């Protein structure tokens, strides 16, 4: 009489049947197999390596043409840089010593005006979209901001001309600031919204749980948490606006003299570059390249300063 | 919070400061790109002489016309004169002051060919119509005896952006060919039958320089700067003329009588033995009756200086100066300027 | 203004009620203020549309719907048709996105997830700065560096190997649709990279860690994070596409500027933004100006349609779930 074999999958043969003729032994207990971490399959491992390698390649391919362009800029522009270039006013062709002093100041003024207009409105709108924006007004504003980003800069310039220059009766730095602010707006609105949405719900709930009113929660907890991304967005918008030429041609016009008045035309680096790059004189072309380099330097310093100043804010 | 308040206060102070009026008399002008270098030299020299600041920005002839129409500038500048229809659109009467002249040259890139290839008007039309497709075509070979022309395809390059240079070139083509006049016409932008477009004079010059077989029309200064060979064009009197400052001024001089009748008449295809046929003037556009006497007078004085003393500076920047006959025409126009009821330049 | 200050007030219960009412009022006022800024964005865009429509009226009245179907662009005869420019805009932007999207997202993944922290921060700082290079510089680079390279190295190869496709037929000029697509791609890369990187960095760590804990490889964990970041990245792409659609200076210098529709990527073309930039400042006749402004209006409408399509795409790809689709 054989004992029924326990339904043990590990058993190679039913217990009880030993070698032929031997009496049945105690039921065999299957030892658990030794732990072996198999890890991902070969296919997944190859996929992993490939994806990581591709990302490295993508990063290199992104940086390469940008570096090539900057190299081209430096190669052509470095020779034109000098102390005189930074401190003098433009001179006519053939006279040495011309500079971009008024254009640098003008670009700073215009960028400041644009930021003054675009940052409060943009961040406010972005906050609204993130916190209260699931309704119809939110959808409308979001859509509008996306569409605004596709309007060519020259069209924004023409619109700003109709809205500011014509009523004022003259070209002005203010109109230029309005045009550039309009260009910055979509970037700031949409990026602010994206980044604020990503602040973890736990932060908001914690603040509300501590008794903070909603507005306090937004300004003291959510916005600081999202500040890194918001600052990025503002700087990105500012960088683009600082390099735009077409809208300024119809709003701030340009100037070869010292002007600080907001209701008069004002010089700017992109317009300077535009004028001088198209001229048939080698000297002026070289100055155009040097000015482009100065613009890049200006935006670098500005961005670095802003990042330093906001570093103290809480990051996610 | 305090940082924001401080920033806001600084901004307010800045605004207050910035609203202060400018010191000396200052005028604003906008328009044509072609004369920008000479104008900027003039305004700089004039400021040093009289202290009057004249701010000029080259936003294009068309935009310059728009701005003078809208009254946002004190004067406009245009490479193309205003037609009667355009003049009617202006709120008040506008007068033209030609300031300098320029030549539109045909620069080409043909390895192995010498500089100064001769071209007839018919050849130019044929190239830009797309009918003459290789350099060794009979039409070109016939007027260039002794030159071996390679069988390279011709690539005609034109301007992609609207420009006074295109206006001068197409005005010339319309004058020498009724077929061109009907099919394409003359304007700052036209619908080109064939060829590629380059942006700006520098774009066309760049393309010609880089593409063997290309030919393009640019202002003289750009051909010189890019060291491109230029073609000698046969003028109305039958002579093949090299584009130089002298031959451009000769073209203006040959048209003096026509300009005296109407300063807007084209000087292209002028008849004069040494006149370069593809020439054009550039104009300042000013309201005959100025609303502001002080500004009107300042502007009139500048124009008077520019057409006399300013002409000395033209050659140095590759612009052709005005001949005396045309300066007299300008003087006559100056005497018609008024502010209110008083003449500005009695 | 917070609840804690009320605890010390005498007559605690009344003070608490007053405090709550005040807080509610402050909340409502704050919400109104934010809504005001959001509305002003809408108002500004509406103002722009009104200005553009006003300027375009003469052309709209003269040409009607034929404007969109005709290929003629003759300023002298005053016949205007926008079809070649519509085509050029669509093709050049599609090309730009084709090049920039994989590269941009790949690079942002590298910067956010794979690069050592310092390297990632420096590189992304550098890439952001490059957004400030004036487009005229891109244009000059495209004309004097990229065009010869394409003319000598790339286009002949394309014609020889792939010339049987109508996409790659023609004469290797170096300038044309391909050049414009590449230059545009380079111009929109900083936008895609910066914003995607910011979005990826803001993704909760828990997502990555959970995936890794379940045995995912590094790439698969990145894939999970990317998936969750999709709406944000799509926002970046829409912004970048906006820039590509509206780019003027750089495109006009390298696209060849002819008003002919051609299937080949090697042929010259023109975009709506480029024709406006080219001709606006020199246009003298009312109808010419109005036609150019009408092109701006058409471009505007085009952007609206493209954005709507992109939105629908997001909704479809996230299965219609609005919480994931989120901002879409």
Image: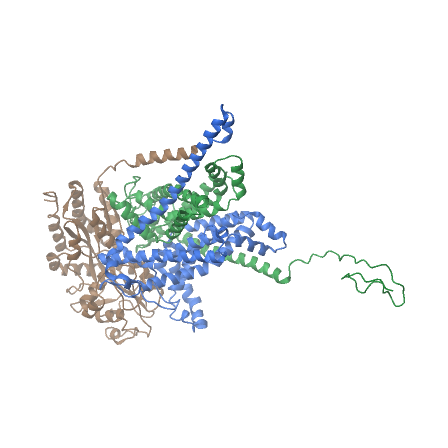
Chain colours: A green, B brown, C blue
Residue A97 visible in the picture = no
Quadrant for the N terminus of chain A in the image: bottom right
**x and y, in percent, of residue C174 in the image:** 39, 65
Quadrant in which residue A263 is drawn: top left
Residue C155 location in percent, x, y? Answer: 42, 68
Q: Is residue B70 left or right of residue A126?
A: left
Occupied quadrant, residue C274: bottom left
Residue B121, compared with residue A152, is above or below; it is below
Q: Is residue C263 visible?
A: yes
| Image spot of residue A147 (x, y percent) | 38, 53
Residue C200, x across and y down, in percent: 52, 50
Residue that sits furthest to the bottom in the current view: B138
Q: Is residue A282 above or below residue C154?
A: above
Asked whether B326 or A304 is in front, the reply is: A304
Is A303 left or right of B136, judged from the image as shown? right
Q: Is residue A162 left or right of residue C302?
A: left
Viewer-closest of B338 and A148: A148
Q: Is residue B242 left or right of residue A303?
A: left
Between C160 and A169, the residue placed more toward the observer is A169
Label tally: 0
Name the residue nearer the viewer: C111 or B97.
C111
**Residue ranking furthest to the front:** A1
């Amino acid at each position: 009489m054989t004992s029924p074999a326990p339904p043990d999958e590990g058993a190679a043969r039913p217990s009880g049947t030993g070698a032929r003729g031997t009496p049945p032994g105690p039921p065999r207990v299957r030892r658990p197999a030794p732990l072996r971490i198999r890890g991902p399959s070969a296919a997944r491992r190859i996929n992993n390596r490939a994806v990581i390698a591709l990302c490295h390649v993508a990063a290199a391919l992104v940086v390469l043409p940008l570096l090539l362009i900057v190299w081209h800029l430096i190669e052509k522009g470095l020779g034109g840089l000098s102390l005189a270039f930074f401190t003098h006013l433009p001179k006519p062709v053939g006279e040495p010593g011309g500079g971009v002093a008024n254009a640098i100041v003008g670009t700073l003024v215009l960028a400041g005006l644009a930021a003054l207009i675009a940052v409060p409105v943009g961040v406010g709108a972005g906050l609204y979209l993130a916190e209260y924006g699931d309704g119809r007004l939110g959808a409308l504003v979001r859509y509008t901001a996306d569409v605004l980003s596709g309007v060519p800069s020259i069209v924004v310039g023409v619109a700003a001309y109709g809205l500011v220059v014509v009523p004022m009766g003259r070209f002005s730095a203010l109109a230029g600031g309005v045009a550039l602010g309009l260009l910055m707006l979509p970037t700031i609105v949409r990026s602010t919204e994206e980044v604020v949405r990503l602040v973890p719900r736990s932060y908001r709930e914690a603040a509300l749980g501590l008794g903070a009113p909603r507005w306090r929660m937004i300004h003291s907890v959510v916005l600081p948490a999202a500040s890194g991304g918001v600052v990025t967005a503002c700087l990105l918008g500012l960088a683009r606006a600082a390099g735009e030429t077409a809208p300024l041609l119809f709003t701030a016009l340009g100037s070869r003299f010292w002007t600080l008045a907001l209701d008069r035309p004002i010089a700017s680096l992109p317009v300077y570059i535009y004028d001088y790059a198209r001229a048939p004189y080698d000297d002026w072309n070289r100055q155009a390249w040097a000015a482009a380099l100065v613009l890049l330097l200006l935006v670098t310093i500005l961005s670095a300063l802003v990042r330093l100043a906001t570093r103290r804010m809480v990051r996610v | 919070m305090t940082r924001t308040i401080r920033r806001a206060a600084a901004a307010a102070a800045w605004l207050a400061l910035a609203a202060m009026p400018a010191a000396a008399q200052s005028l604003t002008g906008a328009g044509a790109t072609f004369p920008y270098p000479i104008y900027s030299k003039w305004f700089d020299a004039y400021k040093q002489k009289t202290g009057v600041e004249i701010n000029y920005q080259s936003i294009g002839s068309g935009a310059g016309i728009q701005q003078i129409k809208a009254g946002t500038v004190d004067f406009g500048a245009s490479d193309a004169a205003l037609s009667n229809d355009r003049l009617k659109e202006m709120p008040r009467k506008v007068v033209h002051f030609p300031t300098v002249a320029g030549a539109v040259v045909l620069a080409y890139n043909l390895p192995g060919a010498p500089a100064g290839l001769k071209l007839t008007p018919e050849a130019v039309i044929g190239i830009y119509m797309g009918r003459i497709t290789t350099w060794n075509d009979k039409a070109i070979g016939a007027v260039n005896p002794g030159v071996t022309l390679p069988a390279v395809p011709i690539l005609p390059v034109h301007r992609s952006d609207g420009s006074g240079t295109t206006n001068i070139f197409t005005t010339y083509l319309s004058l020498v060919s009724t077929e061109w006049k009907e099919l394409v016409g003359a304007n700052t932008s036209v619908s080109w039958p064939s060829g590629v477009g380059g942006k700006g004079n520098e774009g066309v010059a760049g393309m010609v320089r880089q593409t063997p077989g290309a030919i393009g029309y640019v202002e003289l200064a750009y051909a010189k700067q890019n060291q491109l060979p230029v073609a000698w064009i046969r003028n109305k009197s039958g002579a093949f003329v090299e584009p130089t400052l002298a031959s451009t001024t000769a073209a203006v001089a040959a048209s003096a009588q026509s300009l005296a009748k109407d300063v807007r008449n084209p000087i292209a295809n002028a008849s004069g033995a040494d006149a370069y046929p593809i020439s054009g003037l550039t104009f300042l556009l000013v309201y005959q009756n100025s609303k502001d006497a002080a500004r009107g007078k300042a502007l009139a004085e500048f124009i008077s200086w520019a057409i006399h003393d300013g002409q000395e500076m033209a050659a140095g920047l590759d612009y052709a100066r005005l001949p005396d006959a045309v300066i007299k025409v300008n003087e006559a126009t100056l005497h018609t300027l008024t502010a209110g009821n008083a003449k500005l330049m009695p | 203004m917070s609840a804690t200050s009320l605890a010390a007030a005498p007559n605690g219960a009344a003070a608490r009620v007053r405090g709550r009412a005040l807080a509610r009022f402050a909340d409502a006022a704050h919400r109104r203020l934010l809504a005001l800024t959001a509305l002003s964005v809408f108002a500004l865009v509406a103002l722009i549309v009104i200005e553009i429509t006003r300027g375009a009226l003469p052309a709209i009245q003269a040409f009607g719907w034929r404007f969109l179907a005709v290929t003629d662009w003759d300023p002298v005869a005053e016949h205007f048709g926008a079809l070649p420019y519509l085509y050029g805009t669509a093709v050049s932007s599609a090309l730009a996105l084709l090049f920039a999207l994989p590269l941009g997202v790949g690079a942002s993944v590298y910067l956010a997830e794979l690069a050592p922290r310092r390297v990632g921060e420096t590189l992304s700082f550098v890439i952001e700065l490059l957004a400030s290079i004036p487009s005229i510089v891109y244009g000059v680079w495209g004309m004097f560096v990229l065009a010869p390279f394409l003319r000598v190295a790339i286009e002949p190869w394309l014609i020889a190997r792939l010339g049987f496709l109508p996409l790659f037929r023609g004469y290797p000029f170096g300038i044309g649709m391909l050049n414009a697509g590449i230059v545009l791609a380079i111009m929109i890369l900083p936008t895609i990279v910066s914003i995607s990187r910011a979005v990826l960095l803001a993704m909760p760590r828990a997502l990555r860690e959970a995936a890794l804990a379940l045995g995912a490889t590094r790439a698969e964990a990145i894939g999970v994070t990317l998936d969750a970041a999709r709406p944000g990245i799509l926002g970046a792409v829409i912004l970048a596409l906006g820039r590509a659609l509206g780019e003027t200076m750089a495109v006009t210098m390298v696209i060849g500027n002819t008003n002919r529709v051609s299937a080949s990527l090697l042929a010259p073309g023109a975009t709506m933004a480029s024709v406006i930039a080219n001709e606006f400042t020199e246009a003298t006749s009312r109808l010419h100006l109005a036609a150019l402004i009408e092109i701006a209006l058409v471009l505007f409408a085009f952007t609206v349609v493209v954005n709507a399509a992109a939105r629908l795409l997001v909704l479809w790809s996230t299965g219609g779930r609005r919480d994931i689709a989120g901002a879409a």
